[in-house]
Image (spheres, rainbow, N blue to C red):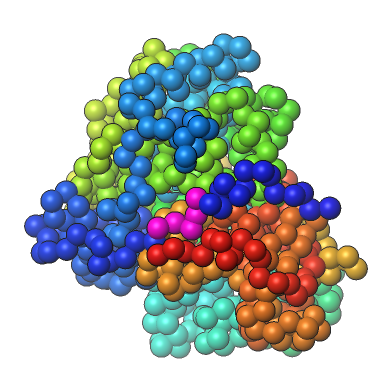
Amino acid sequence: MPIPPPENLALLDAFGPHRAYERDRAPSGSPSHLVKTHCCFCGQQCGIKLEVKDNAVVGFEPWYDFPFNKGKLCPKGIKRYLQNQHPDRLVRAYAKDTSAPEGFRALPYEEAITRVAAEIDRIQTHYGRDAFAVLSGASLTTEKTYLMGKFAHMTLRTANIDYNGRLCMVSAGAGNKKAFGIDRGANPWDDLLGAEVIFIAGANIAECAPITTDYVWQARERGAKVIVVDPRVTPLARTCDLYLPVKPGRDVALFNGILHLMIANDWLDRPFIDAHTVGFDALAAHVAEWTPAQTAEVTGIAEPLIRQAAALWGKAKTSFLMHARGIEHHSHGVQNVLGAINIVLASGRIGREFCGYATITGQANGQGGREHGQKCDQLPGGRDLANPEHRAYIAGVWGMEPDELPQPGVDAYEIFRKVERDEVRGLLSICFNPVVSLPDNNFIRAMLDKLEFYVAIDFFLNETARYADIVLPGSLHEEDEGTVTQVEGRVIKINKAVSCPGDARQDWRIIQDLARALGRERGMTFASPEAIFDELRVASRGGICDYSAISYDKIDQQFGVFWPCPDTGPDGQPTPEHRGTVRLFEPGSWNPIARGAGPFYFPDGKARFNVSRYTPPAEVVDADYPIILTTGRVVSHFLSGTQTRRIGPLVDHCPEPFVELHPRLAERLGIADADWVRVVSRRGETTLQAHVVRTIRPDTVFIPYHWAGRKSVNQLTIAAQDPISKIPEYKVCAVKLEKAQAPAYRAELEPQQ
Ligand SMILES: Nc1nc2c(c(=O)[nH]1)N[C@H]1C(S)=C(S)[C@@H](COP(=O)(O)OP(=O)(O)OC[C@H]3O[C@@H](n4cnc5c(=O)[nH]c(N)nc54)[C@H](O)[C@@H]3O)O[C@H]1N2
Ligand SMILES: Nc1nc2c(c(=O)[nH]1)N[C@H]1C(S)=C(S)[C@@H](COP(=O)(O)OP(=O)(O)OC[C@H]3O[C@@H](n4cnc5c(=O)[nH]c(N)nc54)[C@H](O)[C@@H]3O)O[C@H]1N2
Ligand code: SF4
Ligand SMILES: [Mo]
C-alpha cells in the first residue's frame, strides 16, 4: 500500500507554487559594469558576463572569449540572473515557530548561530560525535566543499558527512577509479570534433548538456556518426545515425554484447590491450555468453541494431564515448559504467587526440565537488579516509593527530536510515534538497520530522528547509568567489558580482561562524576563498586530484587549468609553472601513482578491464505493477527546481510535470493526450497529465523530477542502491497507470500570478 502523505503536506503545498519572477519586475537600466563568471547551473559551466548595477545583477551578456561555450548559453543560463533580486531570497535567519503564519519567525543572525552551536554541542555531548550529521552539495565552489569536509572531519569530528553528488556522480566515479585509477573526464571537449563515431549512452544532452550538443553537431558536420542509447528518442536521438531503444536497466548487457562482437570480428586494438591493460581474458570469457541473440533478448534492442552498433564502434579509427545518469542511476550503475569503459579500452581509443571517454558531470561543480573531502569516505586531493598514510598527511596539514580524524561514514541515504535507528539525531544541510531529490521521499519526510534538530543553509527556503528548526541565509552564486571544476576537468573561477543582501552571508563565513560559536575555531579562520584555496592546494599536493600548482591568477590567464597540476615534478623538483593536464592517459605521461610505468593511475601504469555483470533492476514489472517508470529532466528546469521554479520564463516554458507514454500504451489504458493519469508504485503515487508521444518505449513511462509535494515523482521511486557507489536507482521502478480526475489540490493551488 502506498504510504499516505503526511499531515503537513497540505501546508507544504500551500507554500508553493512559488512566486515566479518575471523580467519586467527586475531592476532595469544600463549596467555600470560587467563581471566575467560562469553559469550557476549545470556542469558545463558556460562562461557568462553578468551585468551589474547598484549591487544588483540586472542582466547578462555572452562571454565570447571563453573557449568552452564561446558565448553560447541555454535557456537556464540566460534567465539565471532573475534569481538575484527575487522576492523569495532569504535575507534573514529564521527559527521554526508553529504559531507564526508561515511556520517561521525571523531572528537575529548571531542568535541563530548561537542556537545552532548549542544544539550541535548538546547532541554531540549526549549521543556522541557521530550523532550529528552533515549533508553538503556539489553546486558549491570547491573551496566550500573543502571547508565542509574539514568542518565535519576536524571541527565536528563526525564520521557522518556526505553530499548530493551521491545521487549523481558516484557510479561514474567508482567505475572510473576501478578502471583508470582516477575519476575525471579524460578529454577536452575539442576531442569530440574529430571523432569518427560518438557513442552517447543514457544522456539527454540536448536538454541537460546543451552546449555539448553543439560539439556533437560540429563533429557530425565533419562526418562523425552518432549512436544514441536511450529508452526515449531524445531530441539528439532524433538526428542520430543509430538509435538503440534500450529497456531501462539493461545497458551493461548491451556493452557486453558489443564487446562479444568486437572479439568475434577482431575489432580490437591488441597491441594497446597487451601493453596498457590487465584483465582482458577474464572479461572475454565472461562476454562469451553475450551473443547477439542473448543481448537482444535482455536489452529489448533488435539484433541487427546491436550488430550495426558493434560494427560502427568496432571499426572506427577515432571515437568518443560519453554517458550520464541514464546508465548510472541504477542499482548496478557501476557495472554499467564498467561495461562502457570496457568497450573503450578494447578499442584502444583513449589518451589520444579525437579518442575520448567521459561521463558528463551534472551539477555546477559535479567534478570538483567530488574531489576534496565531502564524500563520506574521502579526504582532500581524492584521498581515502581509510588509508593511514592519507590520514597522516591531511592530519598534518590540519594540525591534528591522525587518530582524531573519524573513520569513513555512510552515504546520504543511509544517514536518513541512521535517523530512523536513532543513531543520528541532528543534521546540518547546505545546498541540498533531499525531500525532493531522494528516492522514496515519504520516508525522508518522516525522518526529517523525527530529527531532534535540523539546520538548513540556503538562499531560498527549499522544501526540505521547511522542516528546519533554524534556517541560515547563505549566498547566491554571484555573491561569492571561488573555483569549480567543469565537465572537462578544467578548474575555473566564479567571480563575485554583488554582495549578500540583509543578514545573508557567504556560505563559508556561516560555517566559520558556527565553528567560532562552538569554541572550535582552530583551522576555521580563513579570511577569503583564496586563503581556503591556498590550503586546499597544499592538502591536494601528491594526491590524485593534485591542484598544487593552480592559482587564481593562472586560471585567469589560461581560461582555466586542467588538473592534475602538480607543483613538484617526477624528479622532486618544483614545477610552479605547470600548465595543467588537458588530456589524461597520453602515452608516455607521468603520474604520481604509476611513476612512469604507464599512463594509467595504478602502480603498474595499466588500465583495468573489469568483468561487468548484468543483474536485473531491483524492482521488475509484474502483473500488479506492469509498467517501467524512468525519471529525469527537462531543459528548462534544474534539479529539485528550487531555483528554476522561481524564474517566470522557465516556468512558462514547462509549468508542470507530466507523464510521457507511448500511444500504444495510452490506447491500451484508454488514456488520451492531456488526460489526468494516476501513476502508482509500491511506495507512493502522483496524478499528472499525460503527454502521449511516439518517442518512448511502449513498456516505459517517463516523469521529470523537478517538482515537490504531490507532484514529486520521488514519492514513487525506489531506494534501492548500487552496492559499490550507493547511487539510488532513479531510472527504474515498477508502476501501474490509470486514468484519473484532475486532483482537487490543482484548483486550490493554481499559480496566483
Ligand atoms: N536542463 C537540465 N540540465 C541539467 C540538469 C537539470 O536538472 N536540468 N541537471 C544536471 C545534472 S545534476 C545532471 S546529473 C545531468 C543529468 O543529465 P542526463 O543524465 O543526460 O539527464 P537525465 O534526464 O537524468 O537522464 C538522461 C537520459 O537517460 C535516459 N534513461 C533512462 N533510463 C535509462 C537506461 O536504463 N539506460 C539508458 N541508456 N538511458 C536511460 C532517459 O530517458 C534520459 O533521456 O544534467 C545536468 N544538466
Ligand atoms: N527521480 C529522480 N531524482 C533525482 C534525479 C533523477 O534523475 N530522478 N537526479 C538526482 C541528481 S543527478 C541530483 S544531482 C540530485 C540533486 O538534488 P539536490 O541537490 O537536492 O537538488 P538541488 O535542487 O540542486 O538542491 C540544491 C539546493 O541548494 C541550493 N543551492 C544552490 N547553490 C547553492 C549555494 O551556492 N549555496 C547554498 N547555500 N545553497 C545553494 C538551492 O537553492 C537548492 O535549494 O537529484 C537527484 N534526484
Ligand atoms: S548548458 Fe549548463 S552551464 Fe551552460 S548555460 Fe545551460 S545550464 Fe548553464
Ligand atoms: Mo546530478
Of residues 11 and 431, the one nearer the viewer is: 11
Q: Residue at x 44, y 20 (%)?
A: 115
Q: Residue at x 56, y 53 (%)?
A: 13
Answer whether residue 633 is magenta in the image.
no
Q: Residue at x 68, y 54 (%)?
A: 715
Query: In terms of image quadrants, where is residue 274?
Result: bottom right
Quadrant placement of the C terminus? bottom left
Q: Is residue 315 at least partly visible in the picture?
A: no
Residue extending farthest to the right is 623
Answer whether residue 16 is magenta in the image.
yes
Residue 404 image point, x, y percent: 52, 15
The relative height of residue 594 versus residue 61 in the rendered view (above or below) is: above
Give the magenta range. 15-19
Residue 56 image point, x, y percent: 19, 52
Q: Is residue 104 at least partly visible in the picture?
A: yes
Query: In terms of image quadrants, where is residue 68?
Result: bottom left
The relative height of residue 8 versus residue 71 in the rendered view (above or below) is: above
Of residues 36 and 28, the one nearer the viewer is: 28
Of residues 741 and 663, the one nearer the viewer is: 741
Query: In terms of image quadrants, where is residue 304?
Result: bottom right
Of residues 731 and 278, the one nearer the viewer is: 731
Secondary structure mainly formed by the magenta segment: loop
Residue 448 image point, x, y percent: 61, 36
Numbered marks: total: 0
The relative height of residue 485 versus residue 128 in the rendered view (above or below) is: below
The relative height of residue 105 versus residue 401 in the rendered view (above or below) is: below
502 with respect to 732 (left or right): left
Residue 81 image point, x, y percent: 28, 59
